[in-house]
Image (spheres, grey):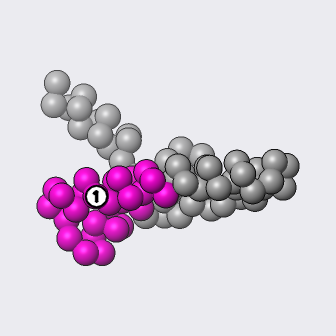
Amino acid sequence: MRAERRSVRDALRSDLPAAHVGLGVTVVALIVVASFSGPRWTLIITGVFAGWFILAATVIRIGSSRGWDAIRRAYIATFGWGNWI
């Protein structure tokens, strides 16, 4: 059971370069959305990502992390999905 959990954790783990890729893809997607639908949907999507980042930073800050480590972990939690592109 532990080996299975460990393998799943390792498969789902993301890091800072993956978060940079996720941020880049998000920016490109926002540019495409802005060019086709205007600023309304772009601001809505940006607000969703900003809200998720603030929520993640708050939860991580309440936990154990402080300062830049909390920001880095929230950044990875928000954009770490770039690992799977």
Left or right: where does residue 81 sit relative to residue 60? right
Looking at the picture, which amino acid does disc 1 mark? Thr
| Residue 75 makes an appearance in the image | yes
Residue that mark 1 sits on? 58
Left or right: where does residue 73 sit relative to residue 40? left
Q: Residue furthest bottom?
A: 68
Residue 1 percent location from the top left of the image: 17, 24
Question: Residue drawn 49% across and 64% down?
Answer: 17
Residue 40 percent location from the top left of the image: 72, 51
- Decide: is 6 above or below 24: above
Q: Residue furthest top?
A: 1
- Decide: is 39 above or below 11: below
Near mark 1 (Cα within 10 A), the count class, few <14, some 14-19 or many ≥20, is some
| Residue 15 makes an appearance in the image | no
Give the main secondary structure of the magenta stretch.
Answer: helix
Q: Quadrant of residue 2 in the image?
A: top left
Residue 9 percent location from the top left of the image: 29, 40
Asked if the stretch drawn in magenta spans residue 53, the answer is: yes
- Number of numbered discs visible in the structure rendering: 1
Asked if the stretch drawn in magenta spans residue 71, the answer is: yes
Question: Residue drawn 23% across and 37% down?
Answer: 6
Residue 38 percent location from the top left of the image: 80, 53
In the rendered structure, which segment of residues is drawn in magenta? Answer: 50-77
Left or right: where does residue 38 sit relative to residue 9? right
Question: Residue drawn 49% across and 58% down?
Answer: 50
Q: Is disc 1 placed on a helix, strand or loop?
A: helix
Q: Residue furthest right?
A: 36
Q: Quadrant of residue 22 in the image?
A: bottom right
Q: Along the line of sight, which residue is nearer the eye, 71 or 47?
A: 47
Question: Residue drawn 22% across and 62% down?
Answer: 61
Q: Quadrant of residue 47 in the image?
A: bottom right
- Decide: is 50 above or below 71: above
